[in-house]
Amino acid sequence: MTPRSIHEMEISGRRLVIRADLNMPMKAGRVTDTTRIERFAGGLKPLLAKGASAVILSHLGRPDGNRSVELTLEPVAEVLGEFLDSPVAFTSVISGAVASKIAAGLRAGEVLVCENLRFDPREEANCATLGAELAELGDIFVNDAFSCAHRAHASTVAISDFLPSAAGPLMLAEIEALQQALEVPERPAVALVGGSKVSSKIDVLTHLVGKIDALIVGGGMANTFLAASGVPMGKSLHEPGQFETVREILAAARASGCEIILPVDIVWSDRLETGATAHIAEIGDCPEHGMILDAGPRSIERIWNVIGTAKTILWNGPLGAFEIEPFEHATQVVAIEVARLTREGAIRSIAGGGDTVAALNATGVTDDFTYVSTAGGAFLEWLEGKELPGVAALRSLQQT
């Protein structure tokens, strides 16, 4: 069940306590990547235009319950004001009487950013007392931080016990995109899962094979799948300890009718370095001194054929060592093809995960995908089929 949307509630004249994810790169007290602020501001503007005021809660970095000048949210508040085209107030306190008094003075359309939540050790402990204090800052709690929803913290869970609660626009967009990819996808539905290790994505793979029609496996994960069937690996990254897991995943896929797509040829080299010589070879022909570092041209063609018949594509993880030229080729050309099909309206494409986003950005196709998630851990836990505490809190309130 999708949580209640803040757009379904009467918010004119109300003060919204909004959990945002404004955790972003900083250098020398300056924001170096404004992507998250820009997206958040885009969702906040319509709420302010309806006559609401907003108190913004967020964390920044990992201060472990201690104050840190380097991790203050004050510079973030300034940049948020730039994207809102209006000054944003900042308070160096997180909760309590002083913060509540400042928040109470907000007028319609005004915004206040409170200091880094993680300066208070009660935040990560999901302390009910801090949740109650944060609730004193406004009238309605809005969780607009899907990327933090896998954490049971005071600002994502405890606070929801004390205020009427709803999901914000970014939270809803993420949930709806993932539901459409996994729960009610237009079929055929295909997942492309890459990355280095099967061990890090066992739950993802196990959950996906019961939901989709085809699973394309790439990267070092594909090496482990191939090695489990006896394909020689040379010095390639693979996990012999996961062979039994691979066999279980393959059996689950057969039982559910999910086709597993593995490389049929490879790109190998004896060095994982920029400009290293890349060799194309058949599966099984990686020499003892070589490392498999990318999918070969026939593998790419096979992937193109699979996604060419799909209606939904879910992507997490690169197909090779995409950070290093020339081993980025398969990831890039498949990304370009998915982007083309999306632009033409042939497929719905959802992608997420740090390496995946970096690869799409490097290829210049991020904006062509239907939805690209920057949620990281929360995105992966959703793919694993787990209930996220921050989403569950909103749903449980909806049921009461």
Image (spheres, rainbow, N blue to C red):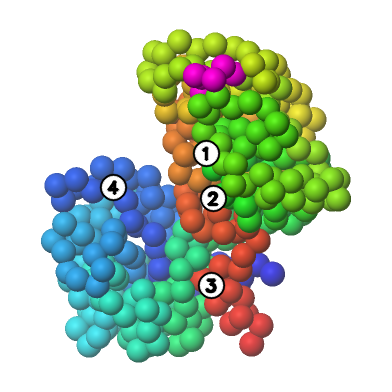
* Residue under label 1: 196
What is the spatial separation of the Cα atoms under label 1 and label 3, in whole angstroms? 28 Å
* Residue 25: mark: 4
Tell me the quarter of the image containing the N terminus: bottom right
SS class of the residue under badge 1? loop
Q: Are marks 1 and 2 in contact (CB under 8 Å)?
A: yes
Q: Report the residue at 61% width, 33% height from top.
A: 223
Q: Which residue is mark 3?
A: 389
- What residue is shown with label 2? 200
Amino acid at the residue labelled 3: Pro
Q: Neighbour class for label 3 at 10 Å: few (<14), some, many (≥20)?
A: some
Mark closest to the chain's N terminus, 1 or 3 = 1
For disc 1, the neighbor class at 10 Å (few under 14, some 14 to 19, many from 20) is many
How many residues crowd around disc 2 within 10 Å: few (fewer than 14), some, or many (20 or more)? few
- Residue 129 at what x, y percent from top left? 35, 89
**Predominant SS of the magenta segment:** loop
**CA gap, disc 1 and disc 4:** 25 Å
Q: Is residue 398 above or below residue 224?
A: below
Query: Magenta stretch?
Result: 286-292
